[in-house]
Amino acid sequence: MSHANPLDAFDSGDPVERRVAGLLARGTLIVLALVVLGTILTVLAGITPIRQPGPRLEVGSLAAELAGLRPGGILWLGLLLTVALPTGRVLVSLVGFARARDRRSALVAAAVLGVLGLSLTLALASG
């Protein structure tokens, strides 16, 4: 039994698969870079993550945290991108399916996005 290389999708003739593979590959590299950078800055700041609580997510101050190259903001951006990548994959797929006029697949992708959106709305509403 042979195992397919995940990067083979870049060579696929399917444009949707190529776009999805590109998004996931680039997104993963960005997440990895952010987490490594945030970890290095955390250590350089003298913070011991094992002994001290991690930084709280303050969405309103995330831009300032990033602009100031604060470790917490960089780590949170990496974590948020980790969560956003699968949603981005579904969105890229939806656009690709719609362009290819693959209605069934586009409807499934739209339904998945709808469930994700509803989940996020309910989570935010419940505090």
Image (tube, grey):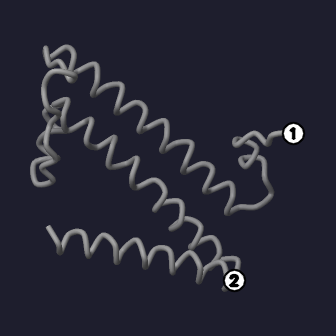
Q: Is residue 13 left or right of residue 67?
A: right
Count of picture labels: 2
**Residue at position x 19%, y 14% from top?**
44
Q: Nearer the viewer, residue 30 or 112?
A: 112
Q: Nearer the viewer, residue 123 or 12?
A: 123
Crowd around label 1: few <14 · some 14–19 · many ≥20 (10 Å):
few
Residue 106's mark?
none
**Residue type at tag 1:** Ser
Residue 106 rendering spot, x and y as whole percentages: 61, 79
The residue identified by callout 2 is 101
Q: Earlier in the sequence, mark 1 or mark 2?
A: 1
The residue identified by callout 1 is 2
Residue 31 rendering spot, x and y as whole percentages: 41, 38
Which element carries disc 1, helix, strand or loop?
A: loop
Q: Quadrant of the C terminus?
A: bottom left
Which element carries disc 2, helix, strand or loop?
A: loop
**Residue at position x 60%, y 56% from top?**
20
Q: Quadrant of the N terminus?
A: top right
Q: Nearer the viewer, residue 125 or 106?
A: 125
Vertical placement of residue 32 versus 95, above or below: above
Q: Is residue 101 left or right of residue 28?
A: right
The residue mark sitting in front, 1 or 2, is 1
How far is disc 1 from disc 2 in space, using C-alphas?
A: 32 Å
Vertical placement of residue 90 versus 75, above or below: below
**Residue type at tag 2:** Arg
Crowd around label 2: few <14 · some 14–19 · many ≥20 (10 Å):
few
**Residue at position x 22%, y 21% from top?**
41
Residue 59 rendering spot, x and y as whole percentages: 15, 53
